[in-house]
Image (spheres, helix red, strand yellow):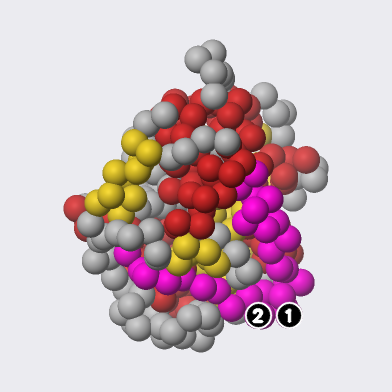
Amino acid sequence: MKVLITGAAGFIAGHLCKRLIGEGHHVVGVDSLDPYYDLSIKRARLKTLSSENAFEWIEGDLCDKDVSEACVSKNIDLVIHLAARPGVRSSLDDPYGTFQRNLMATIQLLEAMKRHGVKKMVFASSSSVYGGTAKPPFREQDAGESPLSPYAASKRSVELLLNCYVNNIPLGATSLRFFTVYGPYGRPDMAIGKFAQFLFEEREAPLYGTGEAIRDFTYVSDTVDGICRAADNLEEGTHKIYNLGGGNRVSMLKVIELLEKYSGKTLKLKRLPAFSSDMKVTEACPDKAKEELGWFPKVSIEEGIERTVAWARTKYGTPCAES
């Protein structure tokens, strides 16, 4: 199978590309290399992927019609759409850029798929769509009508857009609501990866609020497995939504405790005010994904943090560490 993965230089996409190539698929990866965070990290991922014969690379912005056209015109069987402008807090500063990269880019991609008869898409949505009114544990049928940030609103907008497209063209789509994905080679702006780095570099880490905010953490291999299962279960004419999370609901204080336990170090903290755009609790109900996809998270928060700390030790623990 030939799979287009958007945002291919990103954290989750890098792990997904490796899995699909290992299973014998041909991967076309596209990424704009947006400097939202250190581009050297993205380029390191690409360097690893580019050594694979079954990986084809396109650099470009999907908002550009010609780029979307070039990607989809390569006899693609399936699109896994992970490209996005991430960041709940940063979207408050740049709502236009967030909607441009998340919603408008998706429209260009869907239009290209329509022109070339590509009928399958898996879309990376977010637990942030549940906003400030949903009661945990969050279920897929919860309305998601009160997003707390432009980022959350943009992700929910794409879900609604997919409803429109499956009703008008022969398309099968699935939206996966990710819950705080972490693990080796993770995004440096996310808490677990950032805190692990700062531990070994003995730097002060920002902690927003009291540390009592609850997050439902998902190890990256579990998220990748959910993506693959969703891809295998696409049905033309339907748009399904699944939570990919559940079972690893802990506070940030507990995360710090586990990081210190497995690193043998003490994290220096700089306490800062909480953001109004941050959800106080995220908790997934995984029942639908378990029943329909046979998916459930396998890696505990303890095991996942231990693995992440072991990786961070090799990357940040010595002056000569390499990515």
Q: Are marks 2 and 1 in contact (CB under 8 Å)?
A: yes
Residue 300 image offset from top left, x and y in percent: 67, 58
In the picture, the disc for residue 40 is none
Image height check: is 253 above or below 139?
Answer: above
Side of 119 relative to 295 (left or right)? left
Regarding residue 213, the answer to whether it shows in the image is yes
User: Foreground residue, 213 or 3?
Assistant: 213
Magenta highlight range? 278-306
Residue 89 image offset from top left, x and y in percent: 28, 55
Q: Could you give the CA–CA distance between mark 2 and mark 1, rounded to whole angstroms?
A: 5 Å
The amino acid beneath tag 1 is: Glu
User: Foreground residue, 108 or 148?
Assistant: 148
Side of 151 relative to 12 (left or right)? left
Side of 125 relative to 262 (left or right)? left
The residue at the point 71 percent across, 75 percent down is: 290
- What is the secondary structure assignment of the residue under circle 1? helix
| Residue 283 is one of the magenta-drawn residues | yes
Residue 311 image offset from top left, x and y in percent: 62, 33
Q: Which residue is mark 1?
A: 291
- What is the secondary structure assignment of the residue under circle 2? helix
The amino acid beneath tag 2 is: Lys
The residue at the point 78 percent across, 40 percent down is: 22
Q: Quadrant of the C terminus?
A: top right
User: Foreground residue, 176 or 190?
Assistant: 190
Residue 37 image offset from top left, x and y in percent: 37, 37
The residue at the point 65 percent across, 44 percent down is: 306
Q: Which residue is mark 2?
A: 288
